[in-house]
Image (tube, helix red, strand yellow):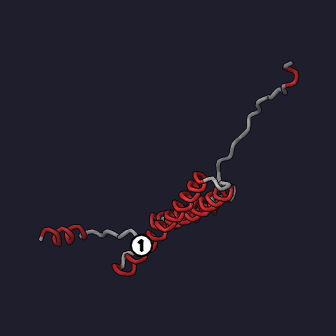
Amino acid sequence: MFGLIPTVHAQPTNINLQPQDGGANLANLSGLTITGVIQTFITIALIVAGVVFLFMLIVGGIRWIMSGGDKAQTETARNQITAALIGLVVVFAAYAIATLIANIFGVDILNFTVPQITPGTGAMISSIFLG
């Protein structure tokens, strides 16, 4: 019975953990900043929200078609389509509000930048607030 199981002999191997290209691809990470990460996160969140909306809308439409005239199933499908549309409106409203804030106040949330703090700035800020 154990003759069907092949015998495995462990052989010592050297594992090379060094990058194959000498680290040339790691040089691309030198420009990685908090600003870029936040911008990428916002972009990915908007894309994911759009894909989820599309998926929910298609599933709701298929449920509506498959309901066969049953009032309860039709109502469930209608509620799912409504929830998908409301979710899409909320996502686009958040994007529109962020763009409006950027245009009115000059604070661009979508192109987030971390302010640089220089020595002596803390004293200036405290004198503004403390008088």
- The local secondary structure at tag 1 comes to helix
Q: Quadrant of the N terminus?
A: top right
The correct choice, above or below, for 8 with respect to 35 in the image is: above
- Where does residue 76 sit, x and y in percent of width and height? 56, 54
Number of marks drawn = 1
Q: Mark 1 points at which residue?
A: 98
Give the quadrant of residue 110: bottom left
The correct choice, above or below, for 35 with respect to 65 in the image is: below
- Residue for point 43% across, 76% down: 99
Name the amino acid, label 1.
Ala
- 37 displayed left or right of 71: left
- 131 displayed left or right of 38: left
The correct choice, above or below, for 80 with respect to 93 in the image is: above
Give the quadrant of residue 96: bottom left
Asked whether the viewer can see residue 125, the reply is yes
- 24 displayed left or right of 34: right
Q: Farthest left residue?
A: 131
- Where does residue 62 sit, x and y in percent of width and height? 67, 58
- Residue for point 61% across, 58% down: 60
- 21 displayed left or right of 83: right
Asked whether the viewer can see residue 32, the reply is no
Q: Quadrant of the C terminus?
A: bottom left
Nearer the observer, 42 or 51:
51
The correct choice, above or below, for 40 with respect to 75 in the image is: below
Neighbor class of circle 1 (other Cα within 10 Å; few <14, some 14-19, many 20+) is: some
Nearer the observer, 4 or 54:
54
Give the quadrant of residue 81: bottom right
- Where does residue 48 sit, x and y in percent of width and height? 56, 61
